[in-house]
Image: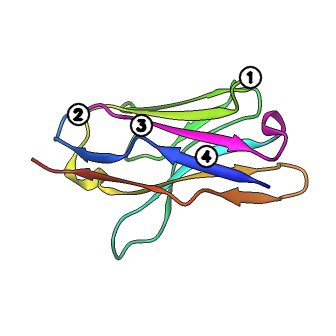
């Protein structure tokens, strides 16, 4: 059974630096690109960050470049998102996604809510 379980969300003060983690199971993690997406109320889901299968290629959404860092551990089957200098506009549900680059198979987590507020 495929599972992607996000953790690390919650209420954060502006300027805070939480770390999200996504634990994967039920598929060959090292063969999937991993991404973090987010969706704020009344807005479309957007890409936050993505990382290639071996961790060498990373890309970020324009709004988080220089503040967020994505990383993965192909032994622990986890992908993390280190978020720094959070702003109120970073408030959203953050989702973890796995995608097999050759077949296109995708899996999504249920999301974790991050609320940035003082």
Look at mark 3 in the image and give the residue it sits on.
65
Secondary element at tag 4:
strand
* Residue 98 horizontal/vertical position (percent): 71, 49
Q: Which residue is mark 1?
A: 75
For label 2, the residue is 16
Q: Is residue 77 left or right of residue 15?
A: right
Compute the Cα span from label 1 to label 2.
Answer: 29 Å
Q: Secondary structure at mark 2?
A: loop
Q: Residue at x 36, y 65 (%)?
A: 40
N-term-proximal mark, 1 vs 2:
2
Q: Earlier in the sequence, mark 1 or mark 4?
A: 4
N-terminal-most mark, 3 or 4: 4
The boundaries of the magenta stretch are 17-31
Foreground mark, 1 or 2, reads: 1
Residue 76 pos. (x, y %): 69, 26
Residue placed most toward the observer, 49 or 107: 107
Give residue 56's position: percent from left, percent from top.
69, 24
Label 4: how many residues lie within 10 Å, few (<14), some (14-19) or many (20+)?
A: many
Q: Which residue is mark 4?
A: 35
Q: Locate residue 53: give its quadrant.
A: top right
Sequence-first disc among 3 and 1: 3
Queried whether the magenta region covers residue 2, the answer comes back as no
């Amino acid at each position: 059974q495929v599972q992607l379980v996000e953790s690390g969300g919650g209420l954060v003060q502006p300027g805070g630096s939480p770390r999200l983690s996504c634990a994967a199971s039920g598929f060959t993690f090292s063969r999937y690109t991993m991404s973090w997406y987010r969706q704020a109320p009344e807005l479309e889901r957007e890409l936050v960050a993505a990382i290639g299968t071996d961790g060498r290629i990373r890309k970020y959404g324009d709004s988080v470049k220089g503040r967020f860092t994505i990383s993965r551990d192909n032994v622990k089957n986890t992908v993390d998102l280190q978020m720094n200098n959070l702003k109120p506009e970073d408030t959203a549900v953050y989702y973890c996604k796995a995608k097999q680059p050759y077949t296109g198979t995708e899996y999504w987590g249920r999301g974790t809510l991050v609320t940035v507020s003082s």
